[in-house]
Structure formats: structure tokens, C-alpha cells
Image (cartoon, helix red, strand yellow):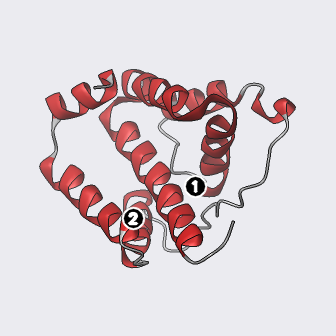
Amino acid sequence: MPSWVKKLFSLYDTDFVDGLKEACSYAQKGSEFGARAIEEAIKRKSRKRELVFYQPDFTIRTPEEYVGVKDQLLNLAKMQELLTDPFETQSLISCCLSFGGYNDLMELADKILEIGGIDQFYSFQLLYNQMHSSALLRKLHGET
């Protein structure tokens, strides 16, 4: 079990974790309800009515795009600003996934928890899961 999961459960906010699990399960079943529920949670948490979310487009990124991405995400977490611009933050997360993969992203989540605290960790989880749910729905609807 990754260390960030252990930390999450040691801080265990059952409402957040259970709600996120339920929303993600809808996306797994091909329902857009889950992705929309996560988007609504991000809107409420950021206290903004209108937000633009990054929509995974499955394009290959260049190595130059990866330079400094982790540092940018950690800086946003440190300044408590992961939700200031969800599109930009999710673009950075997408770039991390393109080059570092899931394990690298989990290490990043662990550092975000350490640097930004539980609030920024939850924000990171919401942003990642909104992207993941959107990508899954696109695949289920035949997009490659």
C-alpha cells in the first residue's frame, strides 16, 4: 500500500473518501454522474461557479513539457493553490502521468500531502479523479 494511502487513512475523512469512491464507481460503470459529481465537489471546494476542466486528449507530450512540472505542482500545493486554476493544475498532472506514470504520481501525491497538508491532498485527489473519470468515460464511448 502506498504511503500516501496509509497517511490518508490515518487522517481518514470518511465523508470525503466514501463520496469520492462512490463518484468514481459511477464512472467505472460508464455513467457521467461520477465525473459530474467530482466536478461539482471541485467547484464547491474552490468556491467558484464556473471552472474549466482539462479534458484528457490522449496526445503524446514532448519531454520538454515535463521539465519542472513536479516543482510547479508542489509549489501550487505549498501556496494552497491547487484549485485556483483546475485546468492548469490538471494539465500539469497529465504531464506527470505521461512521463512518470502512476507510481511517480503517487510519490507526488505523498509529497503534496507532506507540503500542502490534507486540504491540498484532497484537492489533488479530486482533480486527478475528475480527469481519470473523464478519460474512462471517453474510452467507454469509443474514443481512443
Residue in the image at 68% along x and 39% along y: 98
Depth check: 64 or 83 in front?
Answer: 64
| Residue 38: mark | 2
Q: Sort mark 2 into few (<14), some (14-19) or many (20+) by Cα contacts within 10 Å.
A: many
Residue in the image at 37% along x and 58% along y: 45
The location of residue 40, given as percent across then percent down, is: 40, 70
The location of residue 62, given as percent across then percent down, is: 85, 37
Nearer the viewer's eye, disc 1 or disc 2? 2
Amino acid type indicated by mark 1 = Pro
Please tell me whether mark 1 sits on a helix, a strand or a loop.
helix
In this rendering, position of residue 110 left or right of residue 79: left
Q: Say whether disc 1 or disc 2 marks the residue closer to the N-terminus.
A: 2
Using the rendered view, name the quadrant where residue 41 is placed. Answer: bottom left
> Which part of the image, by quadrant, shows the N terminus?
top left
Using the rendered view, name the quadrant where residue 67 is placed. Answer: top right
In this rendering, position of residue 63 left or right of residue 98: right
Please tell me whether mark 2 sits on a helix, a strand or a loop.
helix
In this rendering, position of residue 121 left or right of residue 83: left
Depth check: 74 or 130 in front?
Answer: 130
Q: CA distance from mark 1 to mark 2?
A: 12 Å
> Which part of the image, by quadrant, shows the C terminus?
bottom right
Residue 40 drawn above or below residue 57: below
Circle 1 residue: 86
| Residue 29: mark | none
Depth check: 118 or 104 in front?
Answer: 104
The location of residue 4, given as percent across then percent down, is: 33, 27
Residue in the image at 24% along x and 26% along y: 7
Amino acid type indicated by mark 2 = Ile
Is disc 1 in contact with disc 2, using a CB cutoff of under 8 Å?
A: no
In this rendering, position of residue 68 left or right of residue 35: right
Residue in the image at 48% along x and 52% along y: 127
